[in-house]
Image (spheres, rainbow, N blue to C red):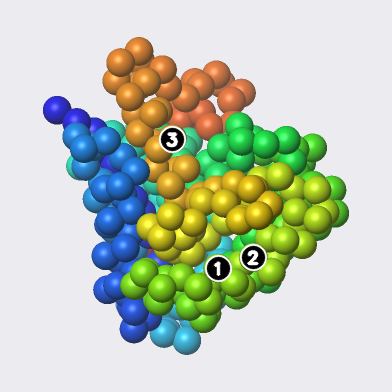
Amino acid sequence: MGLKILLQNIMHEEEMGADSEIIWDGLVRLAKKVVRPDTAVTLRHLKKDRGVPDSLNWPWPLTWPCTQPLREAAIVNSTLKAEEEGFDAVVVDCALDPGLRQARGMLNIPITGAGESGLLIAQLLGRKFAIVAPSDTAIAGLEENLHFLGFGDRAIKHRPVRHFEIVFGLADAFRGKPKRLIEDFEKVAWELIRDGADVIVNACGLSGPAFSLNGYVEVPEAHVPVVDATTAALKLAELLADLQKSLGLRKTTLPTGFYRTPPKEVWDETCRRLKKALA
């Protein structure tokens, strides 16, 4: 029997916008393309909190660090449900990795985030990488993650995280017409290449998959690889689940470890409060 992986969207279905169906279909096609045939990937939206006004939904939850925990609570709760349902691994499909550290501490199954995974794969493909974010509001969070993970020396020194706007061309890219999106992306990518990058990480859970589906995996002429962070997270989740099943390799349980699981009474109370907060 193959693996079961949850690909967790960090938005509600309504927040995906008018083109949500074509984008969702693209994510399904990407998952089938990159994992083994016997690995089943389930995509899931976050459940909408009806108590939050529409004006305070996306992109509000992840725009400021002080508001991120409100969305992260829903993400962690969904990952806990996934383990209860028998999933072998979970992917958080956002390069900011919201809720990833908290969920990794709560779960016994592997969990990957698009941001961390994209950076890990980038370091296997070149010596100096850089990151392209989907908006300027994501830059600070991506820079923080870069240094938290200890990867700062592997990134270019001058502005290693820059952004392009994915407002235009995203839906067309999922329809097989990526020209506009690629052109906007490459304006930033070439700046990073001139500043020393030999690998580019596309740090977006939507534009990265759109590029992958269209076979865009490098900046032409420069021959610089472009890492789709979502694809990286899917493959690493599959790998970690394989290693846990075959060898028993799993996260640290060292009492001083960052991702250590809390004692059962603390774990139970945390789960109870998460569910209560989102009821």
Coordinates of residue 61 in the picture (x, y in percent)? 52, 70
Among the 4 quarters of the image, the one containing residue 74: bottom left
Residue under label 3, please give it. Answer: 236
Residue under label 2, please give it. Answer: 186
User: CA gap, disc 2 to disc 3?
Assistant: 26 Å
Kindly check if marks 2 and 1 are in contact, taking CB atoms under 8 A apart as contact: yes
Residue under label 1, please give it. Answer: 182
Coordinates of residue 181 in the picture (x, y in percent)? 53, 72
Vertical placement of residue 50 versus 149, above or below: below
Tell whether 29 sits left or right of 250: left
Among the 4 quarters of the image, the one containing residue 88: top left
Name the N-terminal-most of marks 2 and 3. Answer: 2
Do we see residue 69 in this rendering? no
Tag in front: 3 or 1: 1
User: CA gap, disc 2 to disc 1?
Assistant: 6 Å
Q: Secondary structure at mark 3?
A: helix
Q: Amino acid at mark 2?
A: Glu
In the current view of this chain or complex, which residue is farthest to the front? Answer: 221
Vertical placement of residue 230 versus 134, above or below: above
For residue 17, the mark is none
Coordinates of residue 28 in the picture (x, y in percent)? 27, 57
How would you rate the neighbour count of disc 2 (Cα within 10 Å): few for under 14, some for 14-19, many for 20 or more? some
Tell me which residue sits at (33%, 53%) in the image.
Answer: 30
Tell me which residue sits at (43%, 47%) in the image.
Answer: 231
